[in-house]
Image (cartoon, rainbow, N blue to C red):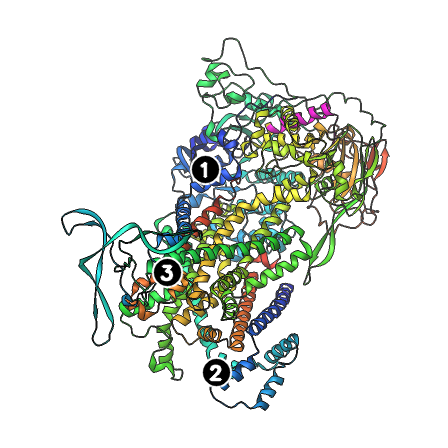
Amino acid sequence: MSRPTDVDPATPDAELAVASQRTLVWRALRRHKLAMAGLVITCLLYLVAVFADFLSPYDPGDINADYAYAPPQQLHVVDTSDGWDWGLYVNGYEQTRDPETLAQTFRENPDEKIPVRLFARGPEYKLFGLISTDIHLLGPDDPDGPPMYLLGASRTGHDQLSRILHGTRISMSIGLVGLAMAFALGVVLGGASGYFGGKVDAVIQRVVEFFMSVPAIPLWLGLAAALPRDWGPLQRYLAITVILSIINWTDLARVVRGRFLALRGEDFVTAAYLDGISRRRIIGRHLLPSFSSHLIAAMTLSIPAMILAETSLSFLGLGLRPPTVSWGVLLSDVDVRALETAPWLLLPGLAVVTAVLAINFLGDGLRDAADPYQS
Amino acid sequence: MSRSDVLLDVQGLKTHFGTDDGVVRAVDGVDLSLARGRTTCLVGESGCGKSITARSILQLVDPPGRITAGHVWWHGDPDAAEPADLAALDPRGERMRAMRGADISMIFQEPMAAISPMYTVGEQLVEAIQLHLPLSRRDATDKAVRLLGRVGIPRPEQRMHAYSFQLSGGMCQRVMIAMALACEPSLLIADEPTTALDVTTQARILDLLAELQADTGMAMLFITHDLGVVAEIADDVAVMYLGQVVEEGSVTDVFDHPRHPYTQALIASVPRLGSRGGRTSRLAAIEGIVPHPLLRPAGCSFHPRCHAPVGDACQELPPELHAVDGGPAARCHWYDDAVRPEGRTLPVIPVAPTIAVTPPAPVPREEAAPVLEVRDLTVHYPVKRGLLNRTVGHVRAVDGVSLTIAPGETLGLVGESGCGKTTLGRAVVRALAPTSGQIRYHDDKGTVDLAALPDSALRAYRGQVRMIFQDPFSALNPRMTLLQLLAEPFRNPALRRDRIGSETEQRVADMLVRVGLRPEYMRRYPHAFSGGQRQRVNIARALITRPRLVVADEAVSALDVSVRAQILNLLADLRDEYDLTYLFISHDLSVVEHLCDRVAVMYLGRIVETTTTDRLFDTPRHPYTEALLSAVPVADPHRRGDRAAQLPDELPDPAAPPPGCAFHTRCPHVQAERCGTEVPQLRGIAPDHDVACHHAEALELRGVRNPISSPS
Amino acid sequence: MLTFVARRVALMIPTLVLISIVTFTIIQLPPGDFLTTYVTNLSAQGEQVDPAEVAALRARYGLDEPLPAQYLTWIWGIVSDGDFGRSFEWNRPVAEMISDRLPLTIVFMAATVVFTWIIAFPIGLYSAIRQYSITDYVATTIGFLGLAIPNFLLALALMWMGLNVFGQDSVGGLFSPEYRDAAWNLGKVLDLAGHLWVPMVVLGTAGTAGLIRILRANLLDELRKPYVTAARARGMPERRLLLRYPMRVALNPFVSTIGWVLPVLIGGEVIVSSVLSLETTGPLLLSSLQSQDMYLAGSIILLVSVMTVIGTLISDLLLAWLDPRIRHGMA
């Protein structure tokens, strides 16, 4: 019997020695500044999605035809009109109508002050679908007085801010729901392909290759166009997620299969097999944890594609439709002429770009951090 | 050596790498001079900075590595009055570029990866020639063909059109050598050029290099971790440890009178071919491991592992290089008169003699029933090709192997890579299902054919037949703690008698202590351990079920010299302690000689010779065994050049083995009769000595210990 | 090599069959068969429908037969005499309508692929050899943005800029009004070139961004390979070393672009062309989908899918021709 090797182990850091995979991935991710920024923004966006009712001053369906294409107002924090004082307010609009074209033009009226307050009362809603309340983060002091359009109004006088916030809910969730379906398909089929190999693998591979070789958008369009016209918003929403996941599962399936195949040949899997443990335990305890981090990275990276796809479909009028509010639906209001009068209608586009960038950064960071054991 | 003999003089070279965790001082003050026309070997374990030193000479260190201090004086230009300092040149500049390949060229460890797969080797060779020589394309092509022929490539005109991936590793290394020699450099830097190659290929490459050096008179800087190779090829030796040269001198001086404790320990920890290991001998392993580069010890960097530190000075003062009369110079306080206590000298580690005077009496094979009997085992893999991926043939990885292992015996299984020894080992533990044949396992309850058992029934034997893997890194699931890993075998439904609880934890703790690890490490993950420590964990995992038979597949091949000795000693100790039977698979014959009682030699899926270790090494009866034995470089410079004929060509395609004796295409003793037509069967030619050769009785073959073994 | 080609072509056939089945399914998805819709449409417009004509059409397309038989009739019509069915919205043969627009679509696509290459190649190359330089960061950022901005948003932005910044009056379309119905001549070609760049930029951005990222990553991988060090150790000049060795390998994605960018482009083309109202197949597909003119829509989907598959085939063959490892079945 030899005596213990008392020389230091390979890691200089004793804390690392007992660090689990999750700890190591988190450590690696924390070093990745862009990924951390992406993580923060993504979390914020999902928080917005959850609290959209509370954060938005109005109901996204509320319209006020008097204020079509009203431009964004500036939110004043300090009231200087009468000395210096704290006070939230926006200026009211002065409307003029072009006598020839009959087009409305708005101008901020510095003399008209519309007081604004935090936790203002507004339209009633159900927080988390449960708690009935009418408190909103920010809103005009007098809910029945003149309206507030911090990000401007649409052609029919919707509050653009409320619509973007509510759009976050649909656009960000469609990515997640679609992902969940793609995940189920991808993991089951990819796993079967990788684990069983042989004929099962060959058949599933052909199917995956087929889906990858078909141009996705025409296929989406075809499927989306074939949806019955009379379906309600919820049915449409589900149908669109299904369509998105039909296209997106292939990437996940490829990741899962590739990992499975690579891992099947790893010594530690053979070693586990030679320990005589059950097949289920080999898969559950040895194989799955080994690529869960890769899977999470791949999943994260496929959310942006879903968001973009939803946006494009809805923009073309083949995806979600009003009264459902998503970023794509909002953007479908935009054409070149509308841009002339109301460039703020492009703001949902900014939301799309922000979300896609943030999630991409996060996914890239996760992918780099996914295997903390590489030397 | 006199000044005029010096070709290259490295002084105080420092190459550092800035990393997130700190500055890694990979090369930290190397002094080294290379003499014209001589071969200098730079030797040391991995992580000592050998390769970085070599690359620093040509300024080939990739970022973030950077030469931060020192000089590389080049005396190779006869016209220049002053030597040129290569370390001061712009790495991307024209002068440096003109030196590379023309005055100093380099060959690498992975010959396959060092040649671009996108162009034929001919195109790359012609390009290399034209880079430095003003030759027309046609002349350069002619020269390329000549060079390929020169480095021993058969049919060079055709090989010009081959891609790297169509050639074997040995062939690729020859191509690399041809490219390196294209412009007749004064210095060839060879960075572990044979490490990735089989022992037989290695022998031929070493011979080629020695021959080319003798012809051209170039100097050679040869980097290796293998002391056998050093003894084989070096004129001078420089030993590196943690970024510094700790000892330098001529090869005979260094091997005969090593001065530095590290050199002494290195030499003592290598099992030497012909030294008769056997059950009584132990290797003098160096304690511990090479420390993490960021945790370099203060004072003499070797002092924590030194078997005999002088005293406090070792922990405080970095030693100077002390030249000693008539011997190598060593960087050690023992040779510093100011530090060394009066009248004391460094205690020397004894080295086992290379030739045993009297062979020990052969251990009689026990008459008890064998633990394992393999009968006509075959493992075939289909080869798929063509439009519909049809099976067009089979690779016969294991092709009718029979062998027996007696209780308590250690059977060595040797052969070149691709001979099927690993597949055989995996079939024995039933990591894969054999195509046909039997694996009969005997225990006190009776005999069972493991080859015929389904998964569920095999579980009952999983605890009795265990395996130790080659790669200590990939064999441990990095996501589980040692406790979880070592408790895993008890999850076996057939084994689980008790619930996994404190009792298991106690067993794990005991096992960890047995293999030389602290029990409190059981909460740690594998990434916290070095290669040697992980191999200890692997061994613990294999032995925790108290197995009877352990298959060790190249269990020490991935380890550094000093750690290898530790693990070999551990394996031997555990064998005695637990009464284990080993099937020890290795390509390294000196390790096999050290550890094994009997040896089976495999070639292209078949056993060609099996007998006791002593008989095999003394009197081999199969030409392949002879060739293998003679290819092993022995860590003793006095036995250089003492070898039989080399094997030509490389292993044939195992999907289409040659007819007759599979070895006849390479056999130096091939006879017109029978060899090419009739498959030789394994037959007993002496007690406990089976050979598969038609002419075993008639051949005069050389063993390791006696020059010629006559027919018995 | 011949086996390789044969194998690749053979693998393509099941994919094509699958595509046609999926397309047929899409055609069949909306309720009712096309003839019913056709008749309804005509009746709604107050036209008389000849029952004999309806019966003839019904027989021609085998509408009373089970679906598999209908599929066979449909696909046989396409394969044997290029009969893609009729567009009931336009009341014209689908084949005719598509052939009007397909050539321009192909020109547009090809121009975009070339544009993608020309932009992505130098940027990706520079980004890799000057890793972590300012240019690299800029290129990487642009790459990310290019992938994050939806096509149509970019199209809208460019149109808005065209109107407000450049004062152009007709940003949409591929021709100025005077050339729209003119016969082909040099002027018309130049006019096309003048109009093509906006849609090209819009459509090519995502592909360019992706290609830059791939080229950069591949090249960085290759630059770390031992053969690069080995070639440098032979005294290969840096520029030649870079262009001749790693570049050859890193170029593979460019060749395979045709394979993976084409589906992206074809999809993007539908959106971009619709926003910019180009006379290509994209807007036709969109309008036919919106009106559930399924024979027209399905035929376009079928055609672009087949184009993709053929593009992939070509890129695979090119790749094999370029890369000896693939040619010799090593990778």
Same chain under badges 2 and 1? The reply is: no
Disc 2 and disc 3: Cα gap in Å?
39 Å
Answer yes or no: are tags 3 and 1 on the same subunit: no
As helix, strand or loop, the secondary structure at mark 3 comes to: loop
Q: Residue B56: which numbered mark, if any? A: 1
Give the answer, above or below, for where B108 lies relative to B539: below
Q: Amino acid at mark 2?
A: Trp
Residue at the extreme left: A83
Let me know if residue B564 is in the magenta part.
yes
* Disc assigned to residue C13: none
Query: What amino acid is at disc 1?
Result: Ser
From the viewer's side, name the closer residue of B471 and B81.
Answer: B471
Name the subunit of mark 1.
B
Q: What is the secondary structure assignment of the residue under circle 2?
A: loop
- Quadrant of the snapshot with the C terminus of chain B: top right
Q: Nearer the viewer, mark 2 or mark 3?
A: 3
- Mark 3, residue position: A60
Query: Is residue A216 positioned above or below B18 on the image?
Result: below
Magenta region: which residues? B563-585
Residue at 47% over, 42% down: B103
Callout 1 environment at 10 Å: few (<14), some (14 to 19), or many (20+)? many
Q: Secondary structure at mark 1?
A: helix
Asked if disc 2 and disc 3 are in contact, CB closer than 8 Å, the reply is no
* Residue drawn at x 75%, y 25% as measured from the top left: B579
Residue B667 visible in rendering = no
Q: Is residue C125 visible?
A: yes
